[in-house]
Image (cartoon, helix red, strand yellow):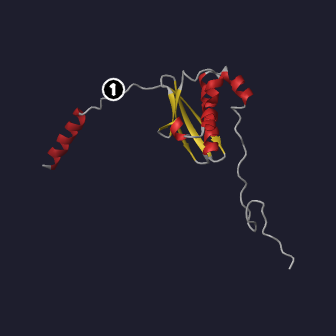
């Protein structure tokens, strides 16, 4: 009895075929980092607009138009803003660090797409990873370098 159920389950499993109608989208993937922020970029040629953490760019950086401009600057400098779209997953850091991480990731993806962009993006400083990080706190100090207040008496 148990063996017949197993045989029936195998037959049912064989008859079920996954039919996917989704068209495989081609994208260029890159990573951008700044301070502790990490942005994973997927640059699409068919898709338009930039989506950050499943939100529109304007919604994610709402009221912060200078960060929106910072993210879009590599596409605008290369004059391809209307030809590409992107999905971005970003985590860590603050708003400014996230915007700069996204900018670096988009720039790297553009270079993967067309190596002729490298010279111009390098000149604008978009391909240089900013190495500045927060200095660690040392023991006996209040912060990285701030010592406790000294009193003579």
**Label 1 Cα crowd, 10 Å radius (few <14 / some 14-19 / many 20+):** few
> Can you give x and y, in whole percent of width and height, for residue 119 in the image?
72, 23
* 85 relative to 6 in the view: left or right: right
**Quadrant of the rendered structure where residue 95 is?**
top right
Q: Nearer the viewer, residue 68 or 143?
A: 68
Q: Which SS class for mark 1? A: loop
Number of numbered discs on residues: 1
**Residue sitting at 61 percent across and 42 percent down?**
98
Q: Nearer the viewer, residue 120 or 13?
A: 120
**Residue sitting at 33 percent across and 26 percent down?**
21
**Residue sitting at 59 percent across and 43 percent down?**
38
* 75 relative to 138 in the view: left or right: left
* 11 relative to 66 in the view: left or right: left
Q: Is residue 45 above or below residue 61?
A: above
> Can you give x and y, in whole percent of width and height, for residue 78 in the image?
64, 22
**Residue sitting at 68 percent across and 24 percent down?**
118
Give the farthest residue toward the left.
Answer: 1
> Label 1 belongs to which residue?
21
Q: Is residue 29 above or below residue 4?
A: above
Give the farthest residue toward the bottom.
Answer: 153
* Image quarter (top left, top right, bottom left or bottom right) of the C terminus: bottom right
Q: Is residue 5 above or below residue 151?
A: above
Q: Is residue 104 above or below residue 5?
A: above
**Quadrant of the rendered structure where residue 17 is?**
top left
Give the farthest residue toward the front.
Answer: 63
Q: Nearer the viewer, residue 56 or 90?
A: 56
**Quadrant of the rendered structure where residue 28 is?**
top right
């Amino acid at each position: 009895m148990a063996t017949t159920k197993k045989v029936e389950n195998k037959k049912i499993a064989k008859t079920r075929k996954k039919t996917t109608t989704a068209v495989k989208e081609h994208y260029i993937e890159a990573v951008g980092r700044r301070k502790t922020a990490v942005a994973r970029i997927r640059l699409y040629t068919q898709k338009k607009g930039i989506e950050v953490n499943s939100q529109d760019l304007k919604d994610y950086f709402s009221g912060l138009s200078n960060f929106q401009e910072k993210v879009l600057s590599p596409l605008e400098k290369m004059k391809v803003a209307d030809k590409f779209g992107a999905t971005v997953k970003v985590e860590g850091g603050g708003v400014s660090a996230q915007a700069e991480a996204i900018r670096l990731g988009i720039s790297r993806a553009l270079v993967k797409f067309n190596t002729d962009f490298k010279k111009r993006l390098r000149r604008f400083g978009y391909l240089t990873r900013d190495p500045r990080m927060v200095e660690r706190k040392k023991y006996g100090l209040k912060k990285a370098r701030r010592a406790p207040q000294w009193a003579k008496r």
